[in-house]
Image (spheres, rainbow, N blue to C red):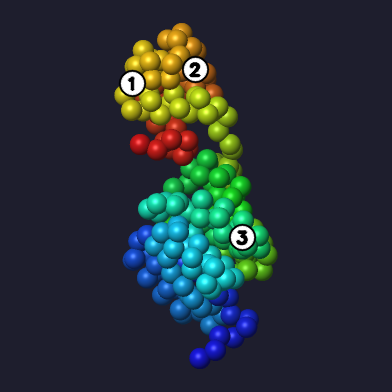
Amino acid sequence: MSIDPKTIRILAADDHHLLRYGIATLVGAEPDMELVAQASTGQEAIEQFRIHQPDVTLMDLLMPGLNGIDATIAIRSEFPDARIIVLTTYAGDVQVTRALKAGARAYVLKGRLAGELLETIRAVHAGQRRIPADVTADFLGESDLTEREIEVLRLIAAGNSNKEIAAQLSLTEETVKSRVSNILAKLGANDRTHAVTIGVKRGIIEL
């Protein structure tokens, strides 16, 4: 059976079979949509995109191996007009920003798929960008931590003392103390533990 040229051809990339099944069920009930391919890793997503060149790609952020953001960058480097919707359970501001910078047209939380996915697919296919208002308002700011400060925050999260961090990064302990103070100030954190909690919530670091 040939696909109507007006049908929106979709690729779904997510490492969870049940989620892909749910997407297939949602899409399969729509007369103007067709799920043409699925992928469970970022590398598979790139390969399936090359084969099918879908109208819209649904891309999970966290997949084994190549993540969704890197897969998005790779696809759009070959196919600049690719229309990609990022799917994630995590509304961290840094993740949102990375996805948008990678070229994603929309950002949908997995908990809202049933209510928002189909409308978002149609909007993105029509050339629109769709970022949920609450995600934009609450999370879309870039972290203003430097790369070195993020490195220090990761080491704090791993349970290292200032002395241990200094040894690992070949810095003086005074320099580490200064960076920790900057981190607390920039994140509005009360202490080191609070800074780690904020860093994880905002997607700056992962535990």
Q: Is residue 156 above or below residue 76?
A: above
Q: Is residue 194 above or below residue 119?
A: above
Q: Quadrant of residue 16?
A: bottom left
Q: Which residue is mark 2?
A: 179
Q: Which residue is mark 1?
A: 160
Closer to us: 24 or 82: 82
Q: Residues within 10 Å of mark 3 (few under 14, many from 20)?
A: few
Q: Residues within 10 Å of mark 1 (few under 14, many from 20)?
A: some
User: Where does the image place residue 50, in percent across and percent down from the top left?
Assistant: 54, 68
Does dot 2 land on a helix, a strand or a loop? helix
The furthest residue to the right: 127
Q: Quadrant of residue 110?
A: bottom left
Q: Are marks 1 and 3 in contact (CB under 8 Å)?
A: no
Q: Are marks 2 and 1 in contact (CB under 8 Å)?
A: no
Q: Residue at x 46, y 18 (%)?
A: 180
Q: Which residue is mark 3?
A: 78
Mark sitting earlier along the chain (1/3): 3
Q: Quadrant of the C terminus?
A: top left
User: Where does the image place residue 160, in percent across and percent down from the top left?
Assistant: 33, 21
Q: Residue at x 49, y 65 (%)?
A: 47
Q: CA distance from mark 1 to mark 3?
A: 42 Å
The furthest residue to the bottom: 1
